[in-house]
Structures are given as C-alpha cells and as structure tokens.
C-alpha cells in the first residue's frame, strides 16, 4: 500500500469513527430539543385554557361547553401554514378536562369516556399540585403513535376544581426530527468526503517529493541517466542530496571496478603483441620480418592510443548529469563534418555517402558531442559497408524529436549480438579484416543521446542485408 493510501485509509477510519459518535450524539440531542421545544408552548396553552375554564365555572362547577366548541371549530379549520419547508394543514392538538376527583368531563380525541375516572400520570400529578406530563401510545403496535400530554390545574378562589391536559401527537414533530437527521447525515457525509479529498490532495502534495525520489532511484538502478530532482524543504533537500551522494559513491566504485576489469581485458591483446614483437626483434631477424614486426608494434600502439583517447572521452561524458554546453546545432552541417573526418578511409574502400537531410534541421544541444556521436556511427557504417556501396544518412522530425538514420549495406547484426552492441568494450569483427574496434563507439553514442533526452537504436534492414542506426534527439 502506498504512503498516500495509508494516509487516506488511516484518516478515513479516524474521521468515520469520530463523526459517527458525533452524529449519534447530535441526533439524540436534536430529538430531545425538538420535544422540549414542543412541550414548552404546550405548558402555556394548557394554563391559558385552564384560566378560561376557571372563568367559565359556575358555583364551583366546571363548564366545558365553550372550550369544546372552540376545540371542535379549530379542528375543522383547513390550514395552510408553511412552516419552513413543511405545510401544516390542520390542528392536531387535543385536550381533555377532568374534575377535582379525576372524572373525565370532556375529551376532544374521544379516547377517555365522559364520566370515567382517569388515573393517568398527568391527571394525578396535576391534581396533587405538581407538574403533570406524560407520553403514551395510542396503539401498542405502532411506535409512532406516541402522544405527549401536559396538564395544568384549574383553580377557583385558590381551590383546585379540576385539570386540563393538552395532547400533541409526536408524529408531526418527528417529521421535523427526521428532516433534521437527513440534513445532518448528508452534511456529515459531504464533510467526510470533502475531508477525504482534502487529505488525499494534502497527502499527494506531501508524498510527491518521495515519489519523485523513488522514480529517480529506480531510474538509477536501471542504469538510466537521471538528473537529480529538485526537492522542496530542508529535510527533502537533505534526503535528495544524501541519495545523490550515495549514488555517486556507488556508481564510482562500480565504475572503477568495471573499467579496471574491462580495460585489463582489452589491453592484454595489444600489450602481448607488442611484447612478443619486441622479444623477437632482440634477436637476429631478417630485414623484411623486422619491418613487419615494427609495423605490428606501431599498429598495436596506435590501437592502445585510440583506446585510451576513447576511454577519456567516455569517462568525461559519463560523469556529466546534464549538458554543460547547449546551443543551436545544424545536423546537416554536423553530418558533413563527421563525414569529412573519414572521407579518406571511405574513398579507399570506394564507399560514398548519400544525404537526405534538410539543411535547416536544427536542434538545441552540444555541437561537439553530437559531431563525435555522428562520427562514431559513420565510422561503424564505413567499417561494415561493402566495397563500392553507399551509406545513406537521413534526418527528419518525428513528434517532438529529431531522428538521424545512418544506413549501410553490410552483413547486419548477428542475433547473438543484438542485446550487447551498446556494452562497453563489446565489438564485432570487421568483415574485411576480422579485427575488432575498441568497442566504445556505440557506448559513447548512447551516452550522448541520453544527455540530449533521446536514445539510439541499431537494427537490421528489412529490405535486405545491412544495418541501420537511429540517433533520436530532443528538439
């Protein structure tokens, strides 16, 4: 699991757990406050009606006709009360009245029969002078049939002559509670989603430098040329520098080890040839053989010099992590100059160059490096081209790249060498002489291509014998 996913999953668990607890507490509090908000005006209504009944009493006897008439009339009214986003269409409040002994005198809901003694909690507590309230179901099978009751004493001349209880079904109140619950639920879900999105973006922002460093480290482990990334913040800059220093140290050790092994292998042959020829020349050698052995010494010494010069060029190039020199490079001119370096060798083999390169094909790069890379490709093509054949150089744009193709009509690349042609010191024998080169040319070309954000490919021709080198460079 990625670091970003760990941040996201961990925060999601904490947020969901915390908000779930908060949601349950909020819902409980919302229900309680809604019922409190309903009960408080019921107390007022009950006491107002109690005073009206007290005023209507005659000789200490309650007269409920006026209240009955008012309640019946109110219940018949068609309301259109828009309470926020809910519409109230009728009066749902009920009342019932008892005398001082708890005998029911009137019940607008028709639940209590007139003349029956009521033993409900609200009646008993109110007649005893206490606050009487209760909640009861009208149906044992319907949990939403709960009705809230609030009682008020009816007093005349300081004596309690009865009580009145105001009833309110909670079904109407629950509609507001459920609406608030839905609003809270969607608000919390939206908040959680926005918080998750925010923590994801924050985690991506925080872990992005680590991801960049990881990709850089993977590119280095694959042997690719990867520039050291720019890191934000003191800690990330320190980590990036430490990684780069470790890379340089490891590459330096591996570089020296590989070079020593490869160079030792490559130097054995010419050194052995020179030592052998010099030992023979110490004796009595006829002049023709002496001249031939001296020529061998000069040839092998030249091979050693060429090998050392190429090693110096390649070592300097491999140390570069980015181009030091950058300017406009005309590729047609670079191909012409590279060909001029090998014109005499090509003429001796009767090899010609056919150019198909736009004179205005220009890129930004290091002119010296590009010229050396093209020179190596052309030299390879000449070495493998048959006598009297032509080498074709093409140049064109492809997307945001420029492609240079050097094509010869030689024997092509053997299957066993396809994966090794760009290895340091690996070389194929030349068709005419059977001799090998230093094996550093194509390796040098590869380094130049990578410095120019490009690549190099070497393939066989599909139309017949021959090979084609493709140098791809960024514009």
Image (cartoon, rainbow, N blue to C red):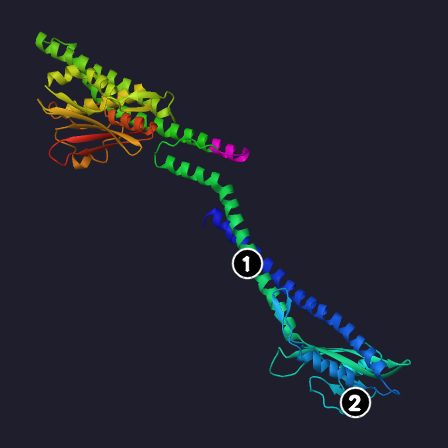
Q: Position of residue 405 (x, y in %)?
A: 21, 28
Mark 1 element type: helix
Which mark, residue 189?
1
Residue 128 visible: no
Q: Is residue 132 above or below residue 240?
A: below
Q: Is residue 182 above or below residue 362?
A: below
Q: Give the residue drawn at x 70%, y 70%.
A: 35
Tell me which numbered mark, 1 or 2, is placed earlier along the sequence.
2
Q: Quadrant of residue 92?
A: bottom right
The residue pinned by badge 2 equals: 103
Magenta stretch prevailing secondary structure: helix
Q: Nearer the viewer, residue 226 or 463?
A: 463
Q: For residue 233: magenta? A: yes
Q: Nearer the viewer, residue 179 or 354?
A: 179
Q: Give the residue drawn at x 45%, y 50%.
A: 1
Q: Position of residue 145 (x, y in %)?
A: 63, 79
Using residue 62 as the reference point, say whether residue 339 is left or right of it: left
Q: Quadrant of residue 446?
A: top left
Q: Give the residue drawn at x 25%, y 15%.
A: 305
Q: For residue 402: magenta? A: no
Q: Which residues are magenta?
A: 231-242
Q: Quadrant of residue 310?
A: top left
């Amino acid at each position: 699991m990625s670091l970003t996913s760990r941040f996201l999953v961990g925060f999601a668990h904490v947020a969901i757990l915390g908000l779930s607890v908060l949601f349950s507490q909020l819902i409980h509090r919302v229900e309680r406050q809604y019922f409190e908000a309903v009960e408080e005006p019921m107390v007022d209504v009950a006491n107002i009606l109690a005073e009206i009944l007290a005023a209507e009493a005659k000789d200490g006897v309650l007269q409920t006709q006026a209240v009955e008439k008012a309640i019946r009339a109110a219940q018949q009214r068609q309301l259109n009360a828009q309470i926020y986003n809910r519409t109230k269409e009728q009066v749902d409040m009920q009342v019932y009245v008892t005398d001082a002994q708890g005998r029911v005198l009137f019940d607008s809901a028709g639940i209590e029969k007139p003349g029956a003694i009521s033993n409900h909690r609200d009646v008993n507590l109110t007649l005893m002078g206490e606050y009487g309230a209760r909640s009861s179901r009208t149906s044992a099978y319907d949990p939403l049939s709960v009705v809230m009751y609030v009682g008020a004493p009816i007093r005349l001349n300081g004596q309690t002559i009865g009580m009145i209880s105001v009833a309110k079904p909670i079904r109407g109140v629950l509609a507001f509670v459920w609406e608030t619950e839905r609003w809270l639920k969607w608000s919390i879900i939206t908040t959680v989603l926005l918080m998750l999105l925010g923590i994801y973006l924050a985690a991506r922002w925080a872990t992005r430098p680590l991801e960049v460093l990881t990709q850089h480290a993977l590119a280095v482990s694959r042997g690719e040329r990867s520039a050291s990334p720019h890191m934000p913040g003191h800690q990330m800059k320190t980590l990036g520098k430490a990684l780069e220093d470790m890379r340089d140290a490891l590459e330096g050790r591996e570089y020296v080890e590989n070079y020593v092994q490869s160079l030792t292998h490559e130097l054995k042959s010419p050194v052995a040839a020179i030592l052998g020829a010099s030992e023979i020349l110490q004796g009595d050698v006829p002049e023709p053989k002496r001249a031939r052995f001296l020529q061998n010494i000069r040839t092998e010494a030249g091979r050693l010099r060429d090998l050392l010069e190429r090693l110096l060029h390649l070592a300097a190039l491999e140390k570069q992590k980015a181009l030091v020199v950058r300017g406009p490079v005309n590729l047609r001119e670079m191909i012409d100059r590279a060909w001029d370096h090998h014109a005499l060798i090509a003429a001796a083999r009767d090899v010609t160059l056919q150019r198909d390169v736009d004179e205005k094909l220009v890129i930004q790069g290091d002119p010296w490096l590009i010229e050396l890379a093209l020179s190596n490709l052309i030299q390879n093509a000449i070495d493998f081209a048959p006598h009297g054949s032509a080498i074709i150089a093409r140049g064109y744009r492809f997307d945001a790249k420029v492609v240079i193709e050097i094509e010869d009509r030689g024997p092509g690349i053997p299957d066993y060498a396809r994966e090794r042609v760009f290895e340091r010191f690996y070389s194929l024998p030349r068709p005419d002489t059977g001799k090998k080169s230093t094996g550093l040319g194509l390796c040098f070309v590869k380094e130049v291509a990578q410095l120019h954000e490009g690549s190099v490919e070497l393939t066989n021709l599909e139309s017949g014998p021959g090979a084609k080198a493709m140098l791809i460079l960024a514009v």
